[in-house]
């Protein structure tokens, strides 16, 4: 090591680092780039935050979040021991890597999907196998099974991002890696047309071999709060608890998230509105010449036959409409396009005006 080199671990020195979507600080933007919910959280959340803030902030929080686990478990029909709360579901992903993957071991994830998995694996010194999705964004089940030998974790967003499609349960049961764990990242699970309650966890193929991750960030309108959770057989949760920080969730987020889950009707009404707007968004984009993947999430993946996605992204941005321009360049053919969050009807009208302003 030369004198000027900083003493990073080689894995960290090599790392490009995950780049989250832009968060402009000034108002006036139509922000459709990071899949936040355009509606506020339940009023019960603010009441719970006030109450918790006036309580005992001098004391450490409940290290296990017992009350949160009780409410989350009830919602999913499992015992509280199946729930592991975290500082956003991203932290649960970090805990999964640290619990199940040693340096040099392999993880896999579908490509294109959530590239944060890759960053987390690289920090751990793990080897990453991208499993290319087919042109219509479905699983190459047979091909994938071959490649999953010796894989410690297979991480799958469902619905997928950036495409928004949902993989069928039958495909998922078929890809639980031998000797490893299937992680289903259900960040967008509440936006599907036919919701479920984690039934797959109880399928014979998945017992003690599968972890669901969920978040309050998207459907519950609480991205600013940081609370997500894992759901898994208590034997798996027990191992993950050994790895997590003692106080990984604070008193305020636990109180707020518990109140949010307790008012599921509020979330259901918001997701209903978002699904209705999603249809308007899809129809409007198709009218303007885009191809749109059928979405079960609160965003859509739109491509245009002329391929000028970067240009559209910039021209929209000049009009203060922010969407996400994404490029996925693997061994497979490069794919790029625009991932557009479903906002309010007014926000989507602003997007359409802006698109029409640039000749779509
Ligand atoms: C938004 C998102 C998350 C992160 O959720 P947090 O709980 O806010 O950390 C995880 N996975 C996917 C696929 C996401 O899009």
Image (spheres, rainbow, N blue to C red):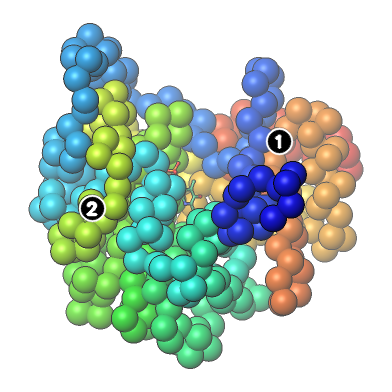
Q: In the drawing, does residue 64 fall left or right of residue 264?
A: left
Percent of width and height locating residue 44: 26, 22
Does residue 339 show up? Answer: yes
Q: Is residue 183 above or below residue 116?
A: below
Question: Under tag 1, what secondary structure?
Answer: strand
- Sequence-wise first label, 2 or 1: 2
Residue holding disc 2: 242
Residue holding disc 1: 322
Q: In the drawing, does residue 61 fall left or right of residue 311?
A: left
What numbered label is drawn on residue 188?
A: none
Percent of width and height locating residue 71: 16, 40
Closer to the camera, 302 or 239? 239
Question: Under tag 2, what secondary structure?
Answer: helix
Q: Is residue 29 above or below residue 282?
A: above
Q: Is residue 353 above or below residue 127?
A: above
Residue located at (37% from left, 80% from top) = 177
């Amino acid at each position: 090591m030369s004198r000027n080199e900083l003493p990073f671990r080689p894995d960290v020195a090599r790392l490009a680092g995950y780049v989250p979507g832009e968060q402009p600080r000034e108002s006036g933007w139509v922000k459709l780039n990071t899949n936040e919910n355009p509606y506020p959280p339940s009023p019960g959340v603010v009441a719970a935050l006030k109450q918790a803030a006036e309580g005992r902030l001098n004391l450490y929080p409940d290290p296990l979040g017992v009350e949160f686990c009780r409410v989350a478990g009830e919602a999913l029909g499992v015992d509280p021991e199946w729930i592991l709360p975290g500082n956003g579901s991203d932290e649960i992903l970090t805990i999964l890597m640290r619990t199940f993957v040693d340096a040099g071991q392999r993880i896999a994830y579908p490509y294109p999907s959530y590239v944060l998995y890759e960053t987390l694996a690289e920090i751990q010194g793990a080897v990453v196998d991208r499993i290319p999705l087919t042109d219509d964004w479905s699983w190459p089940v047979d091909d994938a099974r071959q490649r999953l030998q010796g894989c410690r974790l297979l991480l799958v967003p469902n619905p997928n991002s950036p495409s928004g499609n949902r993989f069928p349960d039958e495909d998922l049961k078929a890809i639980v890696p031998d000797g490893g764990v299937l992680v289903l990242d259900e960040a967008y699970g509440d936006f599907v047309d036919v919701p479920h309650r984690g039934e797959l966890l109880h399928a014979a193929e998945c017992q003690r071999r599968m972890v669901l991750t969920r978040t309050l960030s998207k459907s519950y309108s609480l991205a600013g709060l940081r609370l997500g959770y894992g759901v898994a057989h208590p034997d798996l949760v027990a191992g993950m608890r050994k790895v997590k920080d003692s106080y990984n969730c604070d008193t305020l987020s636990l109180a707020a998230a518990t109140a949010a889950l307790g008012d599921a009707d509020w979330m259901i009404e918001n997701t209903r509105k978002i699904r209705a707007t999603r249809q308007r968004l899809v129809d409007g984009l198709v009218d303007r010449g885009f191809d749109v993947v059928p979405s079960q999430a609160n965003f859509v993946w739109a491509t245009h036959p002329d391929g000028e996605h970067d240009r559209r992204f910039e021209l929209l941005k000049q009009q203060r409409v922010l969407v996400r321009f994404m490029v996925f360049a693997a061994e497979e053919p490069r794919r790029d396009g625009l991932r557009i969050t479903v906002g309010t009807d007014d926000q989507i009208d602003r997007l359409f005006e802006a698109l029409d302003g640039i000749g779509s």
